[in-house]
Amino acid sequence: MLDNLQQRIITKARPSAQRLAVGFMALVLLSLLGLDAWQIWTARDHVLREAHTDTNNLARSLAQHAESTVQEADTVLSDLVERVQVDGTGPAQLARLHRLMQTRTHELAQLHGLFLYDKNGNWLATANDVDPQGVNNADREYFQFHRFNRSAAVHIGPVIRSRTNNQLVIPVSRRVDAADGSFAGVVLATLDLEFFNRFYQSFDLDHQGVILLALSNGTVLARRPFDEHVIGTSLARGRVFSELLPNQPAGSSMMPSLIDGVARLFSYKALDKYPLVVEAAQSKDAIYATWYANLARSIVFLLLVGGALSVFGVILIREIQRSLLTEAKLRNAHAALEILAMQDALTGLANRRQLDAALPHEIGRARRSGKPLGLIMIDVDHFKRFNDLYGHPAGDQCLCEVGRAVLDCVGRSTDLVVRYGGEEMLVLLPESDWAGTWLVAEKILHNVRALAIHHAGNDGGLVTVSAGVHVWLPEGGETHPNALVQAADDALYKAKSHGRNRMHPPQQVRHAQSEATL
């Protein structure tokens, strides 16, 4: 890239025709980009609106199906309740009820079975050819509900496993009262869960699409794709049941699924007559699949047009820029050489030359701002032994890894990490007090230890570093760059003399220094 000076030179040298050509190409490209962006956004909005319409229509259709399915079963239950309360439960009446239950079960495809229980949960009449012996249903959720709830309304319970043939069924039940209004038993219609599964599988949805039937409290009754482990789980914490349904009985929203985390557009509808909710959902990926394909084609088109205009522009201005580009290359080469001159060839860190240029500048800036200037001198412990044990190539690799670990401990653009010489490195931290500088030093020691570089010649068997910390405060008087480096180096010497793999001053001295500056 050309630097700012090169750009100014090129701009001044361009004739008006070149400026017009560049401006025209830029205008054409921007116009195409703007028009295509508007079309892409409009198409995306249209795709989402269509998906809203499709899922809302599907949810309404599913709600109508669920309501008619339950209503047909409820009509049968109401008839059975009336017959029991009028005719009683004598042997002849139970025989007629048995024949009626079998007829209704054969007529309605959704019915798995019909049952009549007395007040103790014993089986009085069913649609079965043969009833299991000694079975009592007083423990079922629906039976307990009616026993302690005087409501004559229909009750829909969570999915259970039939005691007749072990199939999964949805219980729909009504209470039977005695003449005095006391609890006399329960009539039950069990809806075959497979009836809903087959119906839901008949819809053309994407492979991540979902159809769901749940109680109004969020308990899952049926779901496509079918997973028995999902049946009976609660979606009460999901956004549909916790936020949307309390405010409106139908709607849609894009959200991640509470069950599998897939982002989908969910449309939901609460049934008018029964405590049920249906959901229909398309995956976000499927909704936008066509739009993404069109987006890719638009991008290719823009790239082709942009490339053609660029080629035209290059041909138009190539001769004018030839000399300027040559000059720019020379300037870039000079800049690259300057960068190389300021950079350590092995580690890629700054070198002594860059430190010599930066340190006086930072001293002057600290003096003007009154802010502290932190330095950390670092030395790889027993590095000569490392070279003797593993060879100089391994030593060079070790220094590179340590340099990267040190560099990872600083994050500001003004911080500088320098390879000072051999295995020594120096970190320059403008506007860093004792607490901040000591914290960086502590992090450096930790990061180097975390490299876990094997070093049989060092205590602990790993490569470690020692660090000397020094902070210069402008109010403490004038100083010289060499004096600051020497102070940090003296602190490093003390750290090494106290056993290496540590820093000086230690933490308690840092606290004393910090309190002294307050």
Image (cartoon, rainbow, N blue to C red):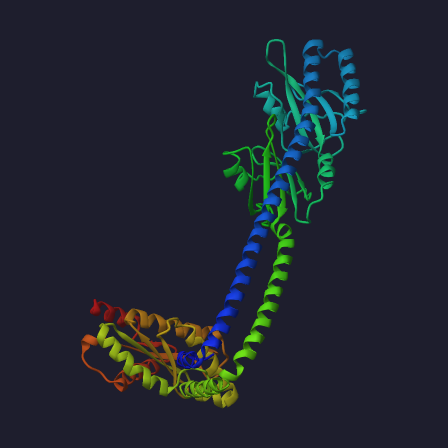
* Residue at the far right in the pictured view: 129
Q: Residue at x 56, y 21 (%)?
A: 148
**Side of 472 where 324 appears, left or right:** right
**Residue 30 visible here:** yes
State whether residue 31 is above or below residue 128. below
Q: Which image quadrant for residue 145? A: top right
Q: How many marks?
A: 0
Image position, residue 179 (x, y; %): 63, 9
**Above or below 449: residue 339:** below
Residue nearest the observer in this picture, 124 or 215: 215
- Is 432 rendered above or below residue 385? above
Q: Position of residue 29 (x, y in %)?
A: 53, 66
Q: Residue furthest front?
A: 17
Residue 508: give x, y in percent of width and height: 28, 70
Residue 163 in the figure: left or right of residue 518? right
Residue 137: horizontal and vertical position, in percent?
Answer: 67, 26
Question: Which quadrant would the C terminus be assigned to in this image?
Answer: bottom left
Residue drawn at x 25%, y 75% is 366
Residue drawn at 69 percent across, 49 percent down: 207
* Residue 117 falls in image quadrant: top right
State which quadrant residue 425 falls in.
bottom left
Residue 472 visible, this angle: no
